[in-house]
Image (tube, coloured by chain):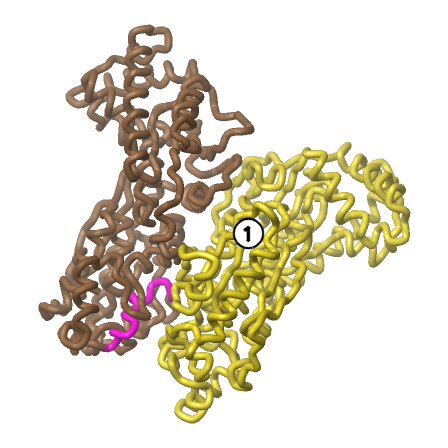
Chain colours: A brown, B yellow
Amino acid sequence: MLYVPHQRDTATTALAMVGLPARGKTYIARKVARYLNWLGHPTRVFNVGSYRRQYLGSHQPHDFFDPDNVAGKAALLEMASSALDDMLSWLDHGGEVAIYDATNSTRVRRQMVQERCRKHGVPVVFIESMCNDPAIIDATVREQKLNSPDYADVDPDTAALDFRARIAHYERAYEPLDDPDSSYIKIIDVGRQVVLNRIRGYLPARLAPLLINLHITRRPIWLTRHGESNFNVLGLLGGDSELSPRGEEYAKNLAAFVHSQAPREANVDVWTSTLKRTIQTAAPLTRKPRAWRALDEIDAGICDGMTYPQIKEQMPEVHTARTADKFRYRYPRGESYEDVIQRLDPLIIQLERQESPVLVIAHQAVLRALYAYMMDKPPHECPSLPIPLHTVIQLTPNAYGCEERRFRLDPILIEPHHSQPPAP
Amino acid sequence: MLYVPHQRDTATTALAMVGLPARGKTYIARKVARYLNWLGHPTRVFNVGSYRRQYLGSHQPHDFFDPDNVAGKAALLEMASSALDDMLSWLDHGGEVAIYDATNSTRVRRQMVQERCRKHGVPVVFIESMCNDPAIIDATVREQKLNSPDYADVDPDTAALDFRARIAHYERAYEPLDDPDSSYIKIIDVGRQVVLNRIRGYLPARLAPLLINLHITRRPIWLTRHGESNFNVLGLLGGDSELSPRGEEYAKNLAAFVHSQAPREANVDVWTSTLKRTIQTAAPLTRKPRAWRALDEIDAGICDGMTYPQIKEQMPEVHTARTADKFRYRYPRGESYEDVIQRLDPLIIQLERQESPVLVIAHQAVLRALYAYMMDKPPHECPSLPIPLHTVIQLTPNAYGCEERRFRLDPILIEPHHSQPPAP
C-alpha cells in the first residue's frame, strides 16, 4: 500500500541472530530476508558458518567449537569479524537490511557487533531463537544440519554425535538476551511466545506479524488462475466478465483435483478475489469462498477493457514506459506490480499463519506476486513469471523455501501469443 | 483489504484486561475497541468499575478494596460477575469481541473468567499492562483517576492519597500472568516490552502492531483535503485533475498555517495520496512528501469522472443502492467505504507510531474514514462526516480519544450543494 519509491531513503538496519545451533536461526533469517526483499527492502543474509567453511574448510570436529579451544576461538572470531566487515560494506553500498546470521551467543560477542554497527551509524535489532523442545531440536538436527556441507560424506550417526557435542560447547557459554536497553525480538519454541523489546522502528515492527505466525506444519498451498473468461477469449485486459464454457469445465476439474489431493480430514480453505470469474471458478467447491479484495487483478486503470495491440497503437507512450520497467510501471489511474505487492502483504501473513491447505483462485498478476514471495524470486522477475490458465501450482513450504509441482488440468488451452508474456 | 462480509461469521473472542489500578488498562481497552470497531468487528468494553459505581455508588474508601475486607471482596466479586454475565449475553446476541475491563489481578479471578467463557465456547486472551515507572503511574493517577467519578467533589490531595492506598491493596494480592498455556499479551511500560504468548488467532495477532506502538507523546495530527481542484469546480467525481487557482492559494495558506502551528523544532511529516491535487497542495511545504497509495480517494469505478446528477439520471440503480447503504455500497468496479477502511489499516498503525506532528493531505472519503477512527465514530456515520474543502482539522490524541479543533483557511469556498452531503 505504501508508495515504495519514497521509502528508498530510509535508514539501514542490521538484524543480528542469536541462539544455539539447531534453533532455526538460518530458517528465520532467510524467511525474514525473503519477506523484506519482496516488500521492496533490499536485504541480504551474512552467514558466518559459510565464511568458516570457505576459509577453513568444512570439516572442523566439535572440539574446534569448544570455548576453551584458544586457536578455534580466535579463528571463529576472525570469521565473525570478516562477515561483519562485508555486511557493513554492503550496507554502505545500497543495502538496506543486513541479517547477521551467527550464534552471537555471548554478551561480549553481541557488544562487539553492536559497537561495530554503531560506528557505521547502523542500528542493531537482535533476533533470538530459543527452543527447548527436544522433538523440534531433534527434527532440525536430522533434517537440516546433517545435510549441511559440514557433514558431507560423514556417516549420519557419527555426524549427529559430533553435532550434539558442538551444541554442548555453545550451551556452556550461552547467555540469552536480557539487556533491557537493547532492541530485540525473542522467539521461544517456534512462535509459542514472542517477546518484543524496544521495537519501535517501522521495519522491525513490521516483522512482528511474520514472526508471531511461524510454524512448521506441512501443508500444500494451491495457486490457480480462474477458469477461462469471456474477456480471455477476446484478449481483453481486466474487466469483470463471466467464465466461458471451457472455464466452467475447468472449475469442475479443479474441484475434482482438490478432492483427490487434499490430505484426509483436512479443511481446505478456498480464497478468491471479489471478481465474478474467480468466484464462479470456486463454485463447484464452495458457494461461500473467502473473497479478498486484495486478490483482485492488477488495476489497469485507463487501459482496462483494452487489448495489448490496442494499447500499443493508441497509447504508444504507455506501451514504451511499461516495457522499460514492467515492475514499477503504474498504469495511468491504475497500479504497478509494486503496488500489488503492498496490498498482498496482509494476505501473505494470513497464508503463513494458516496450518490447513489453502486454494487461492485469483489472477495472473496477483499470482505472480504471491509466487514471487513463496519462491523467493527477485522483484524484477515478477512481471514475467509464467502463470498459465488451467494450471494448478502446488507449493509446499519446507525448511528453506517451497517444493513446487504443477498440474495442467483439462481443458488444455493454447493461449494466444499476446496474453502470455506481456503481463498482466 | 479483506472483503468484510465474509468475516462476519468469525467466532467471538473475549479480551480480559489484567493489571493494577492506574496502569492504563482502560486506555488500552478503549483503544483496542475503537480499532476493532473501525475494522468492522463489533466490539464492546465491559468496565467492572462502572458496575461498582452504578450499584454501590461512587465513594468507596480505599479499605473497601482491601483483600482482607470480606464484605468488600464479596461485593466486588458480585460486580465482576454481573459484568461477565452481561458480556457473555452480549456475545450471544451478535457481539464479536468483548473486552472485560477489570483488574483480574489474581489467578483465582482469571480462572473464573476463563471458566465462565469456556462454558460459552468463547476463547479468552488476557491483556496485561505492567508499569513500574513511577513517573508514568503518577501522570496516570493525576490526569485520569482524580478526574474519575470515584473522586468527584474530593480534594485532589486526599483523593491521591486514597487512590494510592487502593493501589497498595491490589499490589499485596497481585499475581502477574505466567501460565505458559494460556493465551496472553503482556505490555510492559507502555510498549517498551511486549510479550505475546500463544497468540495464534487472526484477531489477537492483528492487535500486536497496535499494541507495540503505544506511546503517550502529545502531538497534533492535521487532516486536510487538497486545495480546490479543477474537477471540484466542475462537480466531477474522482479523476486526477490539477489545482484551481483558488486551490493553489489554499496550498500557500496551508504552508503558512503549519509553520505557525508546529511546535518549535518539531519535524512535521507531510503525507499525501499519489494524486496530483494532493501533491500540489503539499508543494509549498515540501517537494518530497510521503505519497501513499492508501490515501488515494475512494475508487468510484465506472462512475469516475461523472457528476452526482449524471449518476442519478443515467444509473438510477447505482443511486438507489448507494443511498440505501452508503457505508457498504461498492461502486461497480470500484470501492465502498468499508474497502477504504481496510486499505487504511497500515496507515493507522503508522499514525499511532508517529511521535512527531503529521499533516495528512488527502480526499473527502479517505479523510472521513481516518476521522472516524480517530474520533471513534460508528461505521454507518462515516459517509456523512463533514470534511469540507479548505479546512484543517487538528486532532490531538489524549488519554481517551482526541481533542479536535477546526481551522478554515482562505480562500473560503461556498461548496455547491451536490458536492457536500452526498459522498464521496
Q: Position of residue A242 (x, y in %)?
A: 26, 78
Whether residue A303 appears in magenta in the rendering, the answer is yes
| A137 relative to A73, above or below | below
| A193 relative to B99, above or below | above
Kindly identify the residue that appears in the image at 37 percent across and 31 percent down: A136
Q: Is residue B32 visible?
A: no
Name the quarter where the N terminus of chain B is drawn. Answer: bottom left
Kindly identify the residue that appears in the image at 67 percent across and 43 percent down: B18
Q: Position of residue A404 (x, y in %)?
A: 20, 49
Which residues fall within the magenta stretch? A291-305
- Residue type at mark 1 is Glu
Q: Position of residue A420 (x, y in %)?
A: 14, 64
Residue B77 appears left or right of A372: right
Q: Residues within 10 Å of mark 1 (few under 14, many from 20)?
A: some
Residue B283 appears left or right of B161: left
Q: Which residue is mark 1?
A: B352
Circle 1 SS class: helix
Residue situated in front as seen by the camera: A268 or B214 = B214
